Amino acid sequence: MRSLTTIPSDRVLSVLAALLLMVWSSMPVSAEHFRIGPEKDWFELLSGDALRPGDVVTLVDGTYTDSRRLVMSHRGTAEQPILIRAEDEAKVIFHRPDAKQNTINLEGAQNLKLEGLEITGGATAIRIQSSDSHRAESIAIESLHIHHIGGVAITCNHPEDNYRGMIFRFNHIHHTSGHGEAFYLGANNGGAVFHHSEVTDNYIHHLNSPTISQGDGIEIKQGSYGNLIARNVIHHTNYPAITIYGTAGQPVNHVEANIIWDSNDSAMQVAADCIVRNNWIASTANCFHSRNHQEAVVGNLEITSNVLLALGKAAPIRIIHPRDSSGANQISGPIRIQHNVMVAGDGALAARIPADALVQFSNNRGKGRVGGVRQTLHDTIDLAELLKRFPSLDQRHPVWRHLNRDQLLAPFKSIAE
């Protein structure tokens, strides 16, 4: 018979302690719910480090203003994000008293969601960047009202930053200043990269005041990739409503089901590496314009099932061959232009595209000559049938609080004339 060895009691206790530690560490962190107003220590809570994964901060009705620089660096987890929200039916206004600082700075924040806030004043409304120890990622900005600010609404353009998993949706943005973009995402020449993110279901308008030097609606810079830009309603911009460069060989960007009118520039400008599908655009300038931009060389474009109404002398589609612009002399990849409806003004071209084997133009309808492929479109457009393709917008879309369906359709009524 084998003898039994007695295990010392202190060793048993150590083993039990280790097992308990493993169990506790695998359990979800207990979340706290904070409810706070502008007369309380809201600045200390939002700028401090007390928030833990799963915590919810509910802000009550009122105006939150402070001259100090507001920096939030909260980090939740994918399973337990941190939520900072306006109380239901409350009007929660973040108003910076001057433009010396941004209203909100998110530095190194991760798995953080801001919801239902209103932002006015300040320089940039929300600037997102890395901190010394953490990069900014997986941030959701939803149902915000940003207006009458001193600069850009939302930026992800800090040098050398890598932005991933951003979700910007259901926001209402208007009356910016300075450069004036609603969304400035990535940096020039790939200096910051914005990828695998979405900008969807936003209502953006009136980025065209005399105080705005640029005023793009959504700008995705060179080297940014794998993003979805969809179902945004954008009108009255100074620069293009949507501006996208190239992806530098990374997965393409998707631009789908956006509704655009009244831009002072080409309504949409896309250089390369993009699927442009089912957008509705009415413009006195080019509806869609492509040319070399920074390192992006025209090409690798799929332009399909869009409705493009040019109200002036410009062509609905204008693509400039790389040899006619700065940079490379060859198109960087196939350009497919298919199943679009293109209506040009009297005597104008329906499309000005390169005569190049890599450019495929087929199954398009509309009115006007097509330069580059020697075609003429002379179709009668059935507006009722066409409207079946009009983008379907979520009932939570902020545009419905300001426009009805007839007002959304009004810029496109002349298609059938």
Image: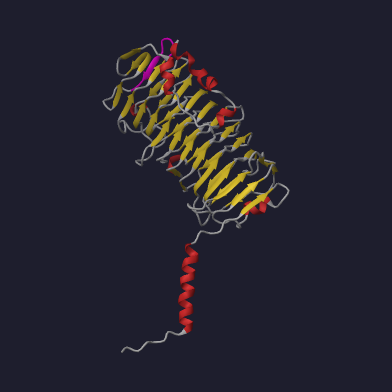
Q: Residue furthest right?
A: 39
Q: Nearer the viewer, residue 405 or 149?
A: 405
Does residue 342 appear left or right of residue 168 in this picture?
left
Is residue 104 toward the left or the right of residue 373 in the image? right
In front of the other: 21 or 333: 21
Magenta stretch, residue numbers: 344-353
Asked whether, in this view, residue 189 is left or right of residue 42, the answer is left
Q: Was residue 393 drawn as part of the magenta stretch in this picture?
A: no
**Relative image position of residue 78 (x, y in whole percent):** 47, 52
Let me know if residue 350 is in the magenta part: yes
Is residue 206 visible from the viewing direction of this image? no
Q: Is residue 102 left or right of residue 316?
A: right
**Residue 231 at what x, y percent from top left?**
47, 31
Q: Please state the horizontal and vertical placement of residue 308, each as a whole percent of the image.
A: 43, 20
Residue 344 lies, in percent from the top left, at 42, 15
Q: Quadrant of residue 230?
A: top left
User: 38 or 360, which is in the foreground?
Assistant: 38
Q: Is residue 233 visible?
A: yes
At 47% across and 77% down in the image, what residue appears?
A: 14
Q: Residue furthest left?
A: 357
For image coordinates 46% across by 81% down, the residue present is 11
Q: Residue at x 57, y 33 (%)?
A: 172
